Amino acid sequence: MLAFLGGTGPEGRGLALRLAMAGEAVVIGSRDAARAANAAEELRALAPQAKIEGAANADAAGSADAVFLTFPYEGQRPTLEQLGTELAGKTVVNVIAPMTFQRGRGASAVEVEAGSAAQEAQELLPDSLVVGAFQTVSAEDLQDPGKTLEGDVIVCSDHQSAKDLVMGLTPKIPNLRPVDGGILANAKYVEQITPLLVNINRIYKVHAGIKVAGV
Amino acid sequence: MLAFLGGTGPEGRGLALRLAMAGEAVVIGSRDAARAANAAEELRALAPQAKIEGAANADAAGSADAVFLTFPYEGQRPTLEQLGTELAGKTVVNVIAPMTFQRGRGASAVEVEAGSAAQEAQELLPDSLVVGAFQTVSAEDLQDPGKTLEGDVIVCSDHQSAKDLVMGLTPKIPNLRPVDGGILANAKYVEQITPLLVNINRIYKVHAGIKVAGV
């Protein structure tokens, strides 16, 4: 079972939908169990064969083998401080790219004292196996089941087994390729590609991804 | 005329060689004019038809229409503090990605107070038109005239005419595509892709580039 905490948002919905379409059982987590159940129902309408349920974040985290963090960065510290027990020993996939938007400047990265959202999550969850991945994959394209995704998923972690698990899941979403991005500290650079892509999207009116050419 | 300050290093040599092969007149700049002349001679041996000369940095900067900064970050402040007059009114292409290397961690980005090397260069050269570009293009592949390059050049600047000039030069190197990366502040994210690529190169034993998929 894969859980998507904050999975009622666009990135969580999109990843949950695509992985459920690939045959994974998924659970959408939310602070509000009713909202999670609604989102699960909406996703099941898009993919009637898929196993998608909804639950409160703590129940979703407790029932899953791997847990995706797909809420905005602002929610990271309060959420993870509450869920240390549920997440202990598990693979935690941090999809968060801390960003802010300013008129005339577009998107820019928010500085994180730990280096990146992924590193901060690992500090908050010392007993979990944190992986940074999927930050650069378009939420819009993920949510459209007919859309072919373009781009790579750069996977960073200090835990090889967790990295292997995420690199194995990635190609279940058609056309997405995992690229080993090395240690978790490298997640900082991947997270910062996201505001760059947001700004490029605005210039070209596209949903761009990033590819590592030559690998 | 295009100048490459610190052009005796691998990135400067490679860019100068490729743009000279495309018919541009180039001048290699160095603190030491004799070293610049040597590098120019070595590059002419690789591309006998090309117009490549060597000069001291100040002379190279003074004679060129557009000037590429291809020295290590440590040299940026002292070099630019000396060359403000020569560089005034010109397009200055910052290729620098501030990086450090640590045993066991690989490459990591050096924090720059201005945000990025490109933004710092613009602060040091208020009368120049600074563009961030080419930071993610493999110096090894550029220096090998038979090698087809892979990847995009993400071009960031607050000066449209200078951005247009660099986006026009980019496809003169076969297979390199310019992508408009927006304002100069976005150069921070591009500069930080470079240590990520260095670490990925080490994992996969390749010379990776970056492509913006979907543009």
Image (cartoon, coloured by chain):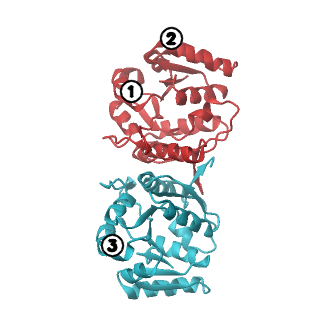
Chain colours: A red, B cyan
Query: Which chain letter matches label 3?
Result: B
The three-letter code of the residue at mark 3 reads: Gly
Query: Which chain letter matches label 2?
Result: A
Q: Are marks 2 and 3 in contact (CB under 8 Å)?
A: no
Mark number, residue A34 = 2
> Across the whole image, how many numbered discs are drawn on residues?
3
Q: In this picture, is A29 found above or below B27?
A: above
- Binning the other alpha carbons within 10 Å of mark 1 as few (below 14), some (14 to 19) or many (20 upward) gives few
Image check: A12 left or right of B126?
right
- Binning the other alpha carbons within 10 Å of mark 3 as few (below 14), some (14 to 19) or many (20 upward) gives some
Q: In this picture, is A171 found above or below B199?
A: above
Q: In this picture, is A124 found above or below B21?
A: above
Query: Which chain letter matches label 1?
Result: A
Q: Looking at the picture, how far across and down is residue B22, in whole percent?
A: 62, 76
Q: Are marks 1 and 2 in contact (CB under 8 Å)?
A: no
> In this rendering, do the residues under marks 2 and 3 share a single chain?
no
Q: Residue at x 49, y 64 (%)?
A: B162
Q: In this picture, is A57 found above or below B52?
A: above
Ranked by sequence position, the earlier of labels 1 and 2 is 2
- Quadrant where the N terminus of chain A is found in the figure: top right
Asked if one can make out residue B101 in the rendered structure from this viewpoint, the answer is yes
As measured in the structure, the alpha-carbon distance from the residue carrying label 2 to the one carrying label 3 is: 62 Å
Secondary element under disc 1, as helix, strand or loop, is helix
Image check: A200 left or right of B184?
right
- Quadrant where the C terminus of chain A is found in the figure: bottom right
As measured in the structure, the alpha-carbon distance from the residue carrying label 3 to the one carrying label 1 is: 46 Å
**In this view of the protein, which residue sits in the foreground, B179 or A186?**
B179
Image check: B78 left or right of B108?
left
- Quarter holding residue A115: top left
The three-letter code of the residue at mark 2 reads: Ala
Q: Which residue is mark 3?
A: B84
